[in-house]
Amino acid sequence: MRQILLIIFTLTILNSFSQKLDITTIDKSKILATLLDSAAKSQLLTQFNGIQDNTLRKKWTARTFLLSDRKVLVEFYDKNAVLIDDIEQFKKLEEVRFVKNTIWNLKKNISYKIELTFERGRQIIDREKPERLTQYKSDLPQWYDFDVYKLNSGQILFLDKSENFQAAAIFPDIKTLASEKTSVLEEEYGSQDDEHLMKKLASGDRLSDYEEDFYLIYPKYLKDLIKNHKLTLEEQKVYVSDFFGNLYKSENGYYILVDEVNQKNGAGNKMQILSLRIYETLQQVKDKQSKYEAFKNKGVTSEHFYQKISDKYAENFPAFAPQLIDTLPSILNFDKEQLSFDSLGIDLVDEALKWNGTDYELFDTWFPSILAYYGQCYITDKQDGKWTMNFDKEDKVWIPEVKLNDGSFAWDWIDFYKDLSEGPIPLRWTGDWDGSRKKMRSGIRTQNRH
């Protein structure tokens, strides 16, 4: 009876909080894994006495657990997880690296890639003779060149032919490849037509893989928008921003709020371009209305990048650095003993940050710890520099920096903040680990002088 209840419990969890991930390995084995959100992961670990097994720890993931029913659960840095049927199937995933798609305006999803040598990539091409996807090409082949192929399995093979860096990788789809390669991203999701998304919306496409609920659309597309989305007017004069809109409900269940054309604005009495928002439920609309009212009453405020850090730590930030670093493993969800103050540590933190950094509401939680870690890592690994506090007299803000022995600074504090808040960009780049940004800026200044 208990076994039957366990099965029912498991099926309930998997049906409610999970989705499937089809993985095709390099030897063409098919593995059907189950993606779990944080709540389902925790329930399964409790119900099936999950034991962390570091001998099975999969690289670039947080932890690996063995369950009492012999399933394997791999936890990611964002606290979500993947469930694999048994150890045998888990071992078949040795060359598979789980990744998180982070294209800024698309929904974030867990996927995978298989990293290969250039030679293995060439062998697959010679053996399978796959279709080359010629629309994806480099704009600067003399510096960075690649080919993209569609394999017989439906997967995508990326072959990096750059002179100084040759490699290959297999991705399950173009979205996963585009998340890692900017040139493919621009071709697949960029457009020279400013009205590209407007036309898609007007055609009835609700852009379901886009994460944002906000778009712009010209009034000329309204008629087709209403027709093709099968919209019925629900409410007028709805405010979620400074301009009011009309709320429509689609026959397919979702809601569209679009600005009313005839209202006063900076261009007169007619809106030249309209804001359009898509909501899953009516409650989401009400929540946005409430948030706007609170924002409107509060007014617009601005603050210095480092205002919160300055308010909390003032000139004493370096003294708090060890304490902040100690919180990093729990914030980014990895085991404390994994953290080191060298290039390997930077790689670990960058990977964990990639999984967590797209939740922009958490930025103020992890940024001080990242700043403290990177500064201490730079000082320790390079045996150069020390913490110094720069006081901005105009804004009355303390800014933590690492000053090097030659009097220069290890990184630009503005770039460091902006790159991490907007990306996050890898620490090696934003923190100028190898001095390349400093050299680039120096080169630009030299060119300008001449």
Image: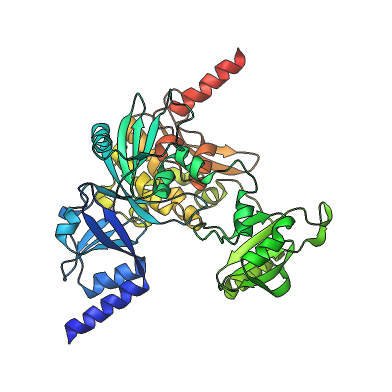
Residue 74 vertical position relative to residue 48 in the rendered view, above or below: above
Q: Quadrant of the C terminus?
A: top right
- 434 or 282, which is in the foreground? 282
Location of residue 178 by image quarter: top left
Regarding residue 257, the answer to whether it shows in the image is: no
**How far from the left and from the top, in percent, is residue 354?**
40, 48
Q: Position of residue 404 (x, y in %)?
A: 43, 28
Q: How is the image coloured?
A: rainbow
Image side of residue 106 versus residue 434, left or right: right
Classify 315 as above or below 379: below
**Which residue is at 30% across, 67% downward?**
41
Classify 193 as above or below 146: below
- Camera-side residue: 32 or 221? 221
At horizontal 35% and vertical 70% (from top left) the residue drawn is 39
At horizontal 31% and vertical 30% (from top left) the residue drawn is 166
Please say whether residue 417 is visible from this viewpoint: yes
User: Residue at the location (23% across, 37% down)?
Assistant: 127
Looking at the image, residue 231 sits to the left or right of residue 180; the answer is right
Which quadrant: the N terminus? bottom left
Residue 162 x/y as whole percent: 36, 27
